Amino acid sequence: MADNQQEEVSKKVSAEEEIRRGITVMRRVVQGRSRGIILDVCWNNQGQLIEPNGHTLTSFIGALVRNEIPITCDDWRNKELNESKEKIWSEVFRCFNIEEERRGFCMKLAGKLLRGFRTFLSSKFLKDADGNFVDAELPKKYESLISAEEWEAFKSKRQDPVFQRISATNRERASSPAYPYRKGRVGYGRLEQSMLQKEESSETSLPAHVLWKEARVGKSGVPQEEVLHVYQKCEELSQSISPNDTKGILSRALDVPEYSGRVRGKGFGVTPTSLSVKKGKAPSNRELHARLEAMQAELDALRREREASASTVYRDASDKNSINCTFQPNIPEGISHCQLYLSSPYYRMVGKGKVHNVSGVLLHTRELPAGCLKVSVDIAVEPNAALPYPSDDSDATTVHEAVGSFVAWPTNLICVGYEMASNEDHPHGDETVGGAEREIKRGITVMKKVIRDRDRGVLIKVHWNEGGQLIEPNGSTLTSFIGALVRNEVPITCDNWRNKQLNEAKDKIWSEIKRCFDIEENRRDHCLKLAGKLLRGFRTFLSTTFLRDTEGTFVDAELPSKYASLISPKEWETFKSKRKTQEFKSVSETNRQRASSPAYPYRKGRVGYGRLEQSILTKENSSETSLPAHVLWKEARVGKDGKIKEDVQQIFEKCETLSQSIVPYEDTDCRSILSRALDVPEYSGRVRGKGFGITQKSLNIKKQKTPSNKELQQTLEALKAEVLELRKERERDRAAGFKDTSDKDSINCNFQPTIPEGISPCHLYLARPTYRMVGKGKVHNNLSELLHTKPLPTGSLKVSVDIALEKDALLPHPDDVSDATLLGDAIGSFVAWPTDLIIVGYETPTKSKAKDKGIAREIESVASQKEIPVAKKTEISKRTGAKKKNPSKYRACLHTYLETTDISDGCVRLIPMDGAIFGFEYAEPLGKEDFDQILYHTQLSVGVINTYMRYLYDKLMGPRGLEQRFSFLNPMKTNLTEMIRKPDEVRTYVVERFMADTDREKLFFLPFNTGDGGHWLLVAINPFKEIVYYLDSLHNDWTTYPAMKTKVDTIIQTVRAQRKIQVPKRKANNITWNRVECPRQRNNIDCGYYTLRFMKETLLMDRTDIPSDYFDEYRCAYYSKDQLDEIKEELCQFIIELQVL
């Protein structure tokens, strides 16, 4: 017996040895996070993870759950695991761009992966081939994840007879499925995705039975007969069953029950609820933000409220704004009509139905939660309100989904037999004998709802417009809350808000704001300025309402009893005495007269400019983020009748005229357009027509995220460029006869820079990417020799090509006369060949096959193909078709060169940039990180982008004469960071580029870096026609980057003014922006490569207009790996040819 057991243990050891793969730790994800790279996650319309990055997220969650959750955990719903679950979700959220609403899915997936890990450990290490238990030691591979105590507890649980009986039953059931799944670990979601992509279908999902059949097709590609039988039965049923039938077609065909919470044939993550939500047109950016905010508020409330005590009657008798109804914790026995309420995020009725208060009643065969009763929902007053206890059986999570079914509802939120009374029927406030006081029926604002939310851990999200003003939702709530705080914390005798004695009170106000609202620290100044404004308004209100009569004469009134809790008698007397002084009365009278008759009165009450602007943009469904000051000023002076006064309209028209005539950078008047039209001075610290909170600084400096590591690196590169430009004259020419003695593959021959006079037989060599002989011929070393009536290039001789050993090798100097660019095309003709690559009079020793790693050339770059006729291209493809291409040959060559340089030690190489490329001459530095981006396919830096633009200029634009129709803008000078920090320099640079050539139509390429993690997109500008083409491989539109759009529009308007082009007022802002449906990237690093291909393909088409659905010749859903590799190969070949290494 001992021998048998020892034999089984040895079998387990050998099983352990077979598992050679290390523990999955997902280092790439963690390293990406540390560099600020957040991976995007994709989902299908049923809520399943798909590629790209679906498999990566699954593996990452598996690694997290194995690290955080002990294998002894048998119940994933155990509350003791909540802290570990929070940590798992936090790590997922830090590494992946994932919505909060996906948390439930990820946690379910984590539980599934934990169960799979435990099953794996049992099967691999604790069972023999017959399924018998083996008492094995803790596998060494998992010692870092599993402690010895956990392993022993894990083993002891599996020795339990009950566990072994259940395990044997499950194993027997799983060992012989009737219709086995044959797609391994792919999963239904990714299987469906691959089928749709393969068929190029426009559908977003497949029927369950179609997917089920495909999942049971093995490697042979032929489904089993019984699988086809079930599929055919499903096809027949699909013609006869009503769409509203609750049992799926596949379950009927298989004659099995439909289990709650899952959909047969759809896989993990799909529920009946997720299938019932029809996916319509993609929501706009504004709609998406609104939905996310509403969902976030609801989720926050649900998570923190679910565990609240259901027996508490949540009603504060001191709250004068509370709802006037009496909740009845003692519901009458039997069945009664009722209204259903929720208390978070505010008290409201969400539905109507019947409450079943019957002894021993069950809900779906389960006991009701404590403090709840069984309720049938008949009417959904608020359909999207979340149920206090979602139904596990029906998958209902909202009131609308629960109509016609039973749910559990907290007793204290059920009202029986009557409607809720309206707040309007119960006026608030104490009745006092004072006339003025009697008119003020409303009680003191105390914002109890905000305090209650704070006590429950709910932070209210605050929103701001582009200029830094409070807007809805929750803008007015925060304003009211600040007003309540300042009235409680600051005495009314305070005349100077900047008094340092108020610092403690200000700190307390800000602390309370942060405890109740989700607000950034940089908003403190705005909130405290608003507090000072509200304090002044409160003091003015007290003076006007209680200390003056209708004629403005002082009245010595008593302290209003309503404000006795806020103001002490001593403060009130001091407040009154200050207003009795002659000096105060004089100033007050002056201010009152000035405010009583404004020339252009504001007519929007307490709305404010910020919320007024928001309502206008929302009403017009505009993509703009702000309005001109004079437009907003006019709208603020429109009364309830909708009519505009004549004098207001005149000012508005004057502003429109001024906006067309002012040239921004030539104007010397510092006043705004509105101030000029009104002929009034521009006061410091404010912007006329924009309202409270807007300053010149807030308009000029747009709010943005903290600069990422990528942005900081770009800034560093700019500084390097300035320093290295001073070293531009450094000698970069290499000695003739480039031969590296350390290169084991170099050719063993002596180059002869001195060629004998006359005509001599010779061998022709190329030095890059490897040293090799490519042909044979004759060298003509005669005095004053010409090539096709033209002088020979410096350092070259005239050569006749007789034999081409490598026909597709590129000529070192392409022949412009014969259009020959390949050595095979030059046979029988004369070409120029570098002297140091000509060998006279003898053969070169042949290299052994074992060492011959030379990479054959291919027709690769745009430059090599630019002038080849179609017939000749066909002939070339026939001649080279049998040769297998190596798409990474130049990258391999560049990698070899870099290993022999000092670049890995931190040195850089300079790429000279001619002034014609970007409008100024400089040297672009490339360092190790830049070369690594090309070699290892990571996100591209601005240095690599600029280098490729020089490649396009040298190899494509110059030879084809395209520089007359196309031009480049330097992305280092025009990225988002520069637009924000140096807007005037950006405008001057771009305007000068546009104005340098105004007599012809020209398309300018601007590779634009958004600054939010280094995303690249292409903005192609035609200033002549005032058309902007927007190509974003993420398929965003320009409203995602409003600062960029505003700056481009301003530049085009400036160019228009300089060209003295007059346009009608209504068309002043009519600059056409075309969003091009370009190929879409499938990960978060390809944006730079896509941007480079967009420029290249536009140049190849030689069109200054880009179709909205992109060019027919290059239209595709996404670029293939070969298309992206082509960019890298062109870059590597170009850098090698520059000989700067």
Image (cartoon, grey):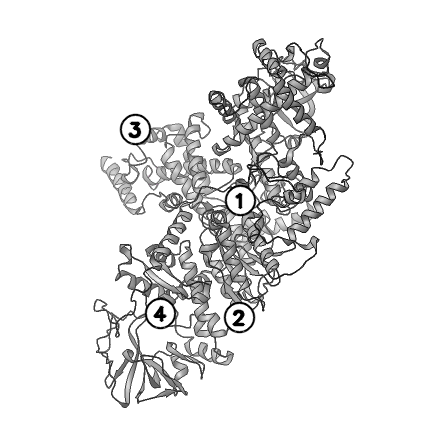
Check disc 4 and report its element: helix, strand or loop. Answer: helix
Whole-percent x and y of residue 375?
A: 65, 23
Q: Dot 2, crowdedness within 10 Å: few (<14), some or many (≥20)? A: some
Label 3 and label 1: CA atoms lie apart by: 63 Å
Q: Is residue 537 left or right of residue 98?
A: right
Residue position marked by numbered label 2 in the rendering: 964
CA distance separating discs 1 and 4: 45 Å
Give me the disc on residue 700: 1
Please identify the quarter of the rendering in which residue 568 is found.
top right
Q: Left or right: where does residue 690 sit relative to residue 896?
A: right
Name the residue tied to disc 4: 1137
Q: Earlier in the sequence, mark 3 or mark 1?
A: 3
Numbered disc 2: secondary structure: helix
Name the element at disc 1: helix
Closer to the chain start, of discs 1 and 4, is 1
- The quarter in which the N terminus is drawn is top left
Sequence order check: which comes first, mark 3 or mark 2?
3
The quarter of the picture where the C terminus appears is bottom left
How far apart are the alpha carbons under marks 4 and 3?
64 Å
Magenta segment? 127-133
Q: Closer to us: mark 4 or mark 2?
A: 2
Q: Nearer the viewer, residue 665 or 382?
A: 665
The prevailing secondary structure element of the residues shown in magenta is loop
Q: Which residue is mark 3?
A: 149
**What type is the residue that disc 2 sits on?**
Gln
Q: Nearer the viewer, residue 792 or 3?
A: 792
Q: Residues within 10 Å of mark 4 (few under 14, many from 20)?
A: some
Q: Is residue 672 above or below residue 374?
A: below
Viewer-nearest of discs 3 and 2? 2
Q: Is residue 868 above or below residue 928?
A: below
Of residues 670 and 155, the one drawn nearer to the viewer in this rendering: 670
